[in-house]
Amino acid sequence: MPQRLPRNPLDLRIHSLHDHVESGPPVPVPLLYTAPFFTRARILSIDWRVSLGAGGNKYPTVEILIDGVALLVAYGSLPMTAAGNQFISCSVQNDDTFYDAANGLYKFQLPPDIYLDSQQQLRMSVDGLVGGDTIATVKLITHEWITPRV
Amino acid sequence: MPAANPVDATVFDLKIDSASNPAAGSEVIYTVPANARIEVLYAEVLYTALVAVANRYVFLKAERNTIEYVQTASTLAQVLGDSFTYHFIAGLPAEVDATHSNRYLVPLNQQLILEPADTLRIDAFNLQANDTFINCRVRFKQWIIA
């Protein structure tokens, strides 16, 4: 049976708008962002870079990870067909998926309600990622609330 | 009487829950707990079509006392031998990639709010006796009501 939160989150304040910059791990591991302790974060936008050894049938994905369980929350439906650097921009704006292969610009839409509680994770990856591909800098814009220490 | 209006309230828990795998040929049923009101953010399920019948369309619906009050259906015609993960996501348009990763994004109603004991059901038009749904998970906001 669900239980009430120990404190009413109405007490909490929206206190910050943060930039989080993560460094790319060795290829071809997806990037993880872990929400800080004692926060609830709502994701507003994600900017990231992918460097592809070769193009074709590679689709950017955004998932949340909670206790080891992954749920897809956004997906770019156009295959990245060009090798080289791709700049990927996701936000809650109502963007159709857009891809300019010649200039390496890729945009797709995030749903408006991506929330991460303390220590929950966001995973940026690419379906079809192989050795030689890299996922580099990720910048996340979030709203965060401080949550009770239970 | 509800303790708070969830459309206005900012007080909510974030939860993820699983539905039991149904028998082959049966729909997935997730039942809202007795003292909770939920707003569904995402739901996903893996659907495998095994029998030689064309054009299954997976859909999600909410029911209260056998009365259906919302439904969203995929526009992908799934056929024999296909195994697709359906991602119902509030606030996104439909997206399909049938050839590579076997994912299908289905738009979900925003502010889909279910009351205690309401059910969320995932089914398919032309569902066949040997077709299966497995690994259904639901992510939602939750309010406790007295």
Image (tube, helix red, strand yellow):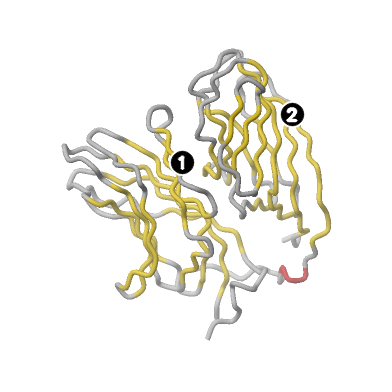
The Cα atoms of the two marked residues, 1 and 2, are separated by: 26 Å
Q: Is residue B75 left or right of residue B52?
A: right
Labelled disc at residue B54: none
Front one among B85 and B74 = B74
Q: Secondary structure at mark 1?
A: strand
In this view, the residue farthest toward the bottom is: B1
**Label 1: which residue?**
B95
Q: Which of pointers 1 and 2 indicates the residue nearer the eye?
A: 1
Count the marks: how many? 2
Q: Is residue A45 left or right of residue B13?
A: right
Labelled disc at residue A137: 2
Front one among A103 and A36 = A103
- Residue type indicated by callout 1: Glu
Q: Quadrant of residue A67?
A: top right
Task: Please check whether the numbered discs 1 and 2 fall on a single chain.
Answer: no
* Quadrant occupied by the C terminus of chain B: bottom right
- The image position of residue A137, as x and y in percent, is 74, 28
Q: Is residue A88 left or right of residue B61?
A: right
The chain to which mark 2 is attached is A
- The image position of residue A139, as x and y in percent, is 75, 37
Front one among A11 and B50 = B50
Q: Residue at x 67, y 36 (%)?
A: A89
**Measured along the vertical axis of the image, is residue B134 above or below residue B72?**
above
- The image position of residue B142, as x and y in percent, is 56, 66
- Residue type indicated by callout 2: Thr
**Measured along the vertical axis of the image, is residue A96 above or below residue A7?**
above
Q: Secondary structure at mark 2?
A: strand
Q: Is residue B48 left or right of residue B36?
A: left
Q: Residue at x 38, y 32 (%)?
A: B98
The chain to which mark 1 is attached is B
Q: Quadrant of residue A11?
A: bottom right
